[in-house]
Each structure stands twice: as C-alpha cells, then as structure tokens.
Image (cartoon, grey):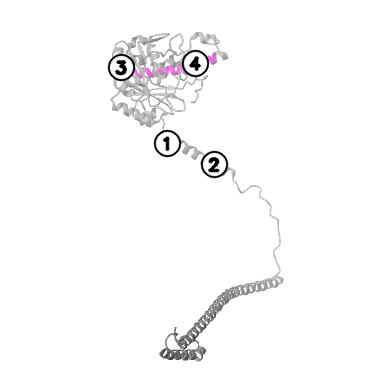
Amino acid sequence: MWRCPAVLAPGFRSSSALRLAETRERFVTVASQYGSGHPEYKKAASQLSELDKQLDLLKASIGRRVASDYQQAQNREGMLKSALADTKAEFDQLNSRSFEYKALKQEAESDKGLYEELIRKIKEAGINSSFQNSSIRLADSARPALKPVFPDLKLNGLIALLFSALIAVGSAILADVLDNTIRDPEDIQRTLKTDVLGSLPVVKQWRGHVVPVGSNGHGHAAAGELESSGGAGGRDGRNEKALARHAPISSFEEAIRTLRDSILLSDASQRPRSLLLTSATPREGKTTTAVHLALAHSGQKRKTLLIDADLRRPGVHTRLGLGNSEGLRDVITADADWRELLQKLEGHPDLDILVGGRSSQRAADRLGAVLERILEEATKEYDLVIIDAPPLLGFAEPLQMAAIVDAVVVVTLAGQTNRNAVRSVLTSLKRVKANVIGIALNEVRKDMSDRYYYYGYYGKYYSKYYKPTKT
C-alpha cells in the first residue's frame, strides 16, 4: 500500500523512499513483460511487499517514539505548572508576611516613640520636683463629728409614715374598687336599685341548722337553761357562758322578725299570701332563712305552710330534723294529696311543712303546674305559704315558681355573692314579671356595714360577752 512520503521522516525519504520507488518501477516493468505466474513477477511482487512491510514497521516505530516524546513533554509541562503554582503561592505568602512585617514594624516604632516620650517626661518631672520645696504642713488631724450627718432618723421616720399612710389609703381604695361582691345594704341600694328588706348577722355555731327553740316558742334560751347555769341574775362564769352562747342566736331571731315584718308590710294595700325565697348561687342561706321565716310567722299564731321546692337538693328536713321519704316529689310523680304529706314540728302547732322528698330531676321539670295548683288551694287555708326554691342561676324551675307567687325575696351572702350574679337574677325575674320585693342580706358582719347591730334587749345585754366570728 502506498504512503505519502510527506508524513515520513527525512532519512526515510532519502534512502528507503528511493529504494521503494525503484522496486515499484521494476515491478511495473516486470508486470508488463511477464504474467502473474512468472517467477520474475513473483520475485518483484515479493520484494515490493517486503519493502511495504518494512515501511509500515518503520512508521509504527516512529509513531511510538513520537507518542513517548509527547507524553514526556506533557509530564514536564505538568511538573513545570506545579512548580510555577508553588512558586506563586510562596511568593504570595512572602508578600503577605511582608505587609504584616511592615505593620508590626510601624507599630513597634510608634510604641518606641511613645516610650521614649514617657521616659523624657519622667526625667523632666524628676528634675522639676528636685527644684520645688513643699510649703504644706499638717495643722490638725481630722476628727469625726459629734452627730451623724446621715441618716436623719426623724426625717426618715416622717417620710416612712407619710408613704405608709398613702400606701394604706391607696390599697383600701383599690380593694374597694376591685371588690365586686355585695357587702352592705347601701351597696345594694346604690348599684342594684333594689330595696334591702333585712340584714341577718353571722351565727357560726349553728350554721346549716335551725335555731334551738325554747319554751317560749322563739329562738331565745329557755329560762330553765339559764337557771341551771347559775341563775337568771347570777354573775358566775357558767351563767356568763350560757348568756354569751345564746346572744348571737337571739340577735339572729330579732333580725328574722324584722325581715318578716318588712316582707309582710312591703305592700300596704295587700299582704303577700305566697312567698318565694331564692338565691343566685347555692349555699347562700336561703333554706335556713326560709325555715326561720316560717317559724317566726307561725309564732304569731298565723297558719303557715313551708314547702321545700328544691327537688334537686332538698334541705328543709335536715334543718328541722324531719323525715324525707315522702314529700313534694310524690305529689308530682304519684299524684298524692299534698295535705296527707304535711308534717308538724313540735312546739309549733300553726306550722305545716311539706318536705321535698327524695331528689329527682324529672320531678323538678314538672314542678310548675303542680305547685300552682297547690298554691291555689293552700292560700285559702294558710295566712302565708313560704317556698324554698333552688338557686336561680342554672335552673329553670325558679322562674316558673316566681311567676305564680305573690312575692319573691332574693337571699344573698354578704361579702361573697357577686354583684353581677345578683343583677342577672333580678333581670331574669323582672323579665317574667315576678314581684321582687327586695333582697335579704345574709351573714352581715360588723366590719361590713354601719347598719349591723344587735336587735332588742339581747343585743345590748350580751354584746360584752359575744364577739362576732368572721367567716
């Protein structure tokens, strides 16, 4: 196969190329004279083929040598590039260190100059001090004063007294502003625009129970009890303890009588024949107030009926020590005759009690219509029917009862009942057109209102033996 001589080496073109050209010319001559089977033709062809092979081997050898040289040249180039990069990095590092050296050298020269200036100043100060003579001498040593300049105890005491008074007054005003409970009758009349029928004092000894009834039918202590303690007019310790024990009970009974008269005389044209006692929330003393109102009213020889209409949590029977197996619940659920379920209290022939019976929510839902029928019949036979109702907030039946009775009294707990709760109760009662004649303020203490006092003779006589207990 013929190759272009231009790609071969110069030495090959001078010798090998010439021989190849001569052999090719001779082969062309022999091929034109002899046939392909002639020995001369075969010999010329063999020589031409041998020269071609030698030429190919030479080209391959030259190519390998050139590739090896090229690879070596690339390796040298890579080494040179790496050496150049290292040299450049070293130069950059030397350059940065040179800048740092110059900065440090400049800072050192500045510190050196400052140090030399300080040395010079010190030397000048030493030279100047050697030429000066001090003319100052100590005439007298300092002594402490006879009286301390600070603190001024009198002034500090007056300031402390002034600030404590201001803080006390501010705290009292702030506590009064933040207090949202009902505390005294004046507060009720001012904020709720409602009459206060009576204030009941605190009697902690028998809270939740009825007042013990003496031989006179009232809450006073029987004379025999006082005599057994040392005589009615005795001055020994046992008699004083008995008098002190019964003083708050008598005060409460006086307050109950005042509340009774305020209720009965609230309407000069017509006395109420049916009275409902309710409250905003539980445990405000409405059941105890209802029981004592019934006792006080029957004590005037007037026929009185007390109905426990709180069928969810009946409590009249516990105050009076009566049974509760049958009551208003049986009238509602079993259509029993309410007259047959009435109970009597010993010592009170004019008082009849209709207890609530076993608690029942279903009976409470059907209370309105049954109670209206009972009131229609009872008001013809009794001078006053007193109904102990559940708390109004959260229960529906008190509104039904309030709409069918002649008068409603709301019992509140002094210092504990929220004013907004009482306002909500009054609003609900007015919405159903109930006749709210006023509020009874329970558990009033002497520190809450100026209207707190002991009623009648017992309050004046026993006040020195009894101090109201705070609750």
N-term-proximal mark, 2 vs 4:
2
Q: Where is residue 270 in the image (x, y as percent from the top left)?
A: 28, 17
User: How would you classify the magenta stretch by its main secondary structure?
Assistant: helix
From the image, tell me which residue sits under label 4.
246
Q: Is mark 3 on a helix, strand or loop?
A: helix
**Is residue 232 at least partly visible in the picture?**
no
Magenta includes 314?
no
Q: How far apart are marks 2 and 3 (CA)?
A: 68 Å
Q: State which mark lies toward you, 2 or 3.
A: 3
N-term-proximal mark, 1 vs 3:
1
For this view, does 339 lie left or right of residue 131?
left
From the image, tell me which residue sits under label 1.
177
For disc 1, the neighbor class at 10 Å (few under 14, some 14 to 19, many from 20) is: few
Q: In this view, does 24 lie above or below 395?
A: below
The amino acid type of the residue labelled 2 equals Ala
Q: Is mark 1 on a helix, strand or loop?
A: helix
From the image, tell me which residue sits under label 3.
370
Per the rendered image, the range of residues in magenta is: 239-267
Q: Disc 4, disc 3: CB below 8 Å?
A: no
Q: State which mark lies toward you, 1 or 3.
A: 3
N-term-proximal mark, 4 vs 3:
4
Q: Is mark 4 on a helix, strand or loop?
A: helix
Q: Is residue 92 above or below residue 226?
A: below
**Is residue 247 at least partly visible in the picture?**
yes
Q: How far apart are marks 2 and 4 (CA)?
A: 46 Å
Rendered image: mark on residue 160: 2
Q: Disc 2, disc 4: CB below 8 Å?
A: no
For disc 3, the neighbor class at 10 Å (few under 14, some 14 to 19, many from 20) is: some
For disc 4, the neighbor class at 10 Å (few under 14, some 14 to 19, many from 20) is: many
The amino acid type of the residue labelled 4 equals His
